[in-house]
Image (spheres, grey):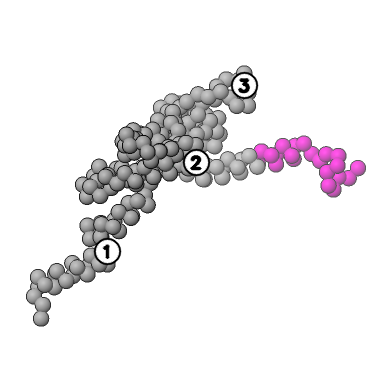
Amino acid sequence: MQTRSQTATTNLVSRKKLHPTFDTLPFDVTRQIIKHLNVGHVIPLLSVCRLFYQMIKPDHDFWRSRLQRDLNVKVSKTNKTMDPFTEIVKRFSSLRCNDCGIMRGPPNRPFVDGFFNLTVCRDCYNHKKYRLITAFTAKKNYFLNEKDLLGLRTVSRINPHYKNGSFVRLYSREAIAEASASKLKKKGITLRERRALQQKRSQATKDRIARDRGPRRGDVGLVV
Ligand SMILES: [Zn+2]
């Protein structure tokens, strides 16, 4: 019969078998898992875990291959003076997406977005949270006015449709939607309900204009 401490030990061992952690995995398995990660994720791991640092940092072949594969930097095997780890660290802040953490070299390197003030890759930038909308759209679709827009971050760009026209002001769509929801909440209505109301009014106006105009030549059912 097992004592209480033996039972606890047995439970701990079986729990570790069911839910293995990096502490319980063999070194080779851990090393292989890390080697499948992008360097943009590996470098932060090294800075928080001494085990990972000791395991991966001295592996020059790994860093050399990652420098070539992830960052598209050509490295000669005969160049003994180049430290591939240092070369990757030098590029860490400029080639790492602040959103997903992946490092990419040319031609898919991340770019600096001036509005959100971060370095971001193309994949992340396509996310709806980075979309910008014009002041006109903010007023028309989100029921905001100039006063509501005053406190929001904005950027001016050349009008793509009218080169000699005034600059367009752009806002974060997320920030606009938030401001709109807050404003409409005070009026006891949601954005969806307000849009439905707008559509109903617009349709009613069209119907009234059509009624006032009367039947036109060529309309179906017109009696001459
Ligand atoms: Zn990204």
What residue is pinned by disc 2? 126
Does mark 2's beta carbon lie closer than 8 Å to ligand 1? no
* Residue 119 x %, y %: 41, 34
* Residue type of the residue flagged with mark 3: Lys
Measuring 22% from the left and 57% from the top, which residue is drawn there?
Answer: 23
* SS under mark 1: loop
Indicate the quadrant where residue 120 lies: top left
Q: Kindly identify which residue carries mark 3.
A: 163
The residue positioned 72% from the left and 37% from the top of the image is 209
The answer to whether 2 is drawn above or below residue 55 in the figure is below
What residue would you read off at disc 1?
19
222 left or right of 61?
A: right
Nearest to the observer: residue 93 or residue 2:
93
Q: Is residue 211 magenta?
A: yes
Helix, strand or loop at mark 3: loop
Q: Tag 2: residue type? A: Asn
For the record, the magenta segment spans 204-224
Secondary-structure class at tag 2: loop
